[in-house]
Every structure is written in C-alpha cells, then in structure tokens.
Amino acid sequence: MKIAGFDIGGANTDLAIIDFDTDGDMGNIHVDYCYLPMWEKKDELSHSLLKLLGDELNDIDAVGVCMTAELVDAYQTKREGVLDILKKVKNTFSVPLGFVGLEGILKPSQVFKDPLKVAAANWIATSQIAAIMDSDCIMVDVGSTTTDIIPIKNGSECAKGRSDLERLGTGELVYTGTLRSNVATITDKVPLDEGWFRVSSELFAISADVHNVLGNINPKDYICDTPDRAGKTSEDSMRRIARILCGDLDILSKSDIISICAYLHHKQTSNIAEAIQEVGDIEFMERVVATGLGMDVLASPAAQMARMNVVTMDEFLTPEECVVAPAVGTALMMEEFLQDQDFTSS
C-alpha cells in the first residue's frame, strides 16, 4: 500500500509518500516540499499537491492531510480556512482521505461537522514518530515558522494545550522558526561596539537571513520570500540585517553584522530553551527528541541550553525526512487508521 501524507502549512506544503508492506511496515519513503504562501495563493493548492505527487499520483492508495494553513489571513476564521482546504483536497483526490485531528485521523465528513478538530494539528502527527523513539520525552520540532514543544508520556502525546491559543500559553508553541521569523520579534536590542542598540520594528530581515549569514542553512533551504524581494546571497542577507539598525553595508562592517547575527541566533535559541524548560518543569521530564528544519540549528542547542538530554530524529529518519516529519507522521497515522477501520472516503 502506498500512502501520501501532506502537511499543508501557511507557507510550505510538504509531502511524504510511504510504501507499506502487508504487515504495515515502512518501506521506501519519498519526500518533497514546495513554497506555497497560502495567504496569496490558496487557489493554487490543488495544483501544488498534484505537482508534488508527480508520476506517483496513479499509484497512491490513500491520502492523509494535516494542516496549519487555516490561520493565514486569506481566511477570516480558522473554520473557514479548514473547510476551504477540505474542499480543495476532496476535489483533488478520489482515493480515501483522512485528516489529522486532535483525536487521530478523521474522515472528511467528520471534519465538516467539527472543523476546529483538525486546525493546527500537525504536531499530533510528528509526535507519533517521536514516541516511537522515546516513549517518555519532549518533542521539539523547529520548522520554518514555529516551534512545537510537545510532552510525550507512555508513548502518547500529553500536551496541556490543544489549540494554538492554549499552547501559546503553556509553552508548547513558540512562534519562532528557522526561516520566516521577523528579526524584530526575536529581540528588541542587539549588542554593537560595546553598547546596546534598539532594533527597528519593521519587516527588514527574517531569521533565514540570520542563519544564511552564519552558514546555518544551505542556500536551497531559503525557500521563502525575502522581505525586500531581493536576492538570497549572504551579502543580500547582510544588507537586510543592517537595516534593522537603520544602517547599510557602508555604515556597518561585515564583522559587525556577523556578530549581530550570532547574538540573534543565541537569543532565538534562548527563547526556545525557556519554553522547553517550562514544559520540562511541568511534566518532570528531561529528555528531548529534536526534529524539523531547525533540528541542528535551533532545537538541539535549545534543548542543551535547557539542560536536557537530546537526541535527533535523524536517528530514525533521514535528515530530509525530518524536515517534513509531520507529513511522514500523517502517512503513518493514515496507514494505521486504514488497517483498523472499514474506511471510506466519506
């Protein structure tokens, strides 16, 4: 059986195709992703899903979906967003469909009745993989935009918060990521010339620029739009970082900017570490499974800063698969659901 798992995010849509044998064991895994800013291009979702599948389309036996794109400002409410994504996915595929919800996989008809049950539930899918690696741990998934910090006990997630709003209050969601975070949200001051300088609260630079300057990401990882719609070289990123201090490359040296980026990296790591420590203190846990695009750049250093024992999910998946871990987890959940139930696509 070949199952496609999609993670439809606000900025990126990820794919994992897994071949399962008759015993439900995983065989080959194919992963891919594309940049699809849903706030601008939500009507291109169907085309993007089909393009990601490519020649595999006719071999797919079922499709599982998790989502966070319902939050984009193209929708007035999350309910509207979920229902629009549901409609687009249903119109795209004729195979059995399932959606990751807070209580497991839901059929489309169940999603229609209670859309919020699948809103921003992609962390449920990722936690399934972390639980395989360690039945008692904190999963830390740093993506392009956000960080999920999910406690797992006895092999099951036990997050205190269920919605994004609740998780922002429990430390289980930190709105910072490897690529798309406005630098002005990471800190309000940076060190320079033995002093401290307040940053401008404009969208001049993003976290991708910080990590691009420091060499923490590969150029191919910088898949989102740049704030100024300019290039993605290290010098382009330096120019954008200089703007947060109302400067440019004539005013600030490259060494100044590298030093500022090193501080921003430290500050972003510290913000995540604070939340990890908060969750760890509540749950009396000290082990972390790190994953996501920022697995090595942010998640692991933050766990170490929080004095946690940390392993990375690339001990179970490949590094490329870790980047799209929610899509992989979605395919796993969909296969298990199909095995357990007499499933129809209704």
Image: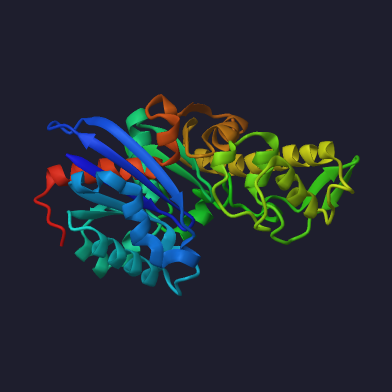
Nearer to the camera, 61 or 120: 61
Quarter where residue 99 is shown: bottom left
Residue in view at x 66 percent, y 50 percent: 231
321 relative to 89 in the view: left or right: right
Residue in view at x 66 percent, y 34 percent: 215
Residue in view at x 36 percent, y 29 percent: 133
290 relative to 209 in the view: left or right: left
**Residue 47 at least partly seen:** yes
Nearer to the camera, 210 or 228: 228
Quarter where residue 25 is shown: top left
127 relative to 173 in the view: left or right: left
Query: Percent position (x, y) of residue 81?
Result: 39, 68
258 relative to 32 in the view: left or right: right
Quarter of the rendering occupied by the N terminus: top left
Give the answer, above or below, for where 307 lies relative to 173. above
Nearer to the camera, 103 or 160: 103
**Residue 157 at least partly seen:** no
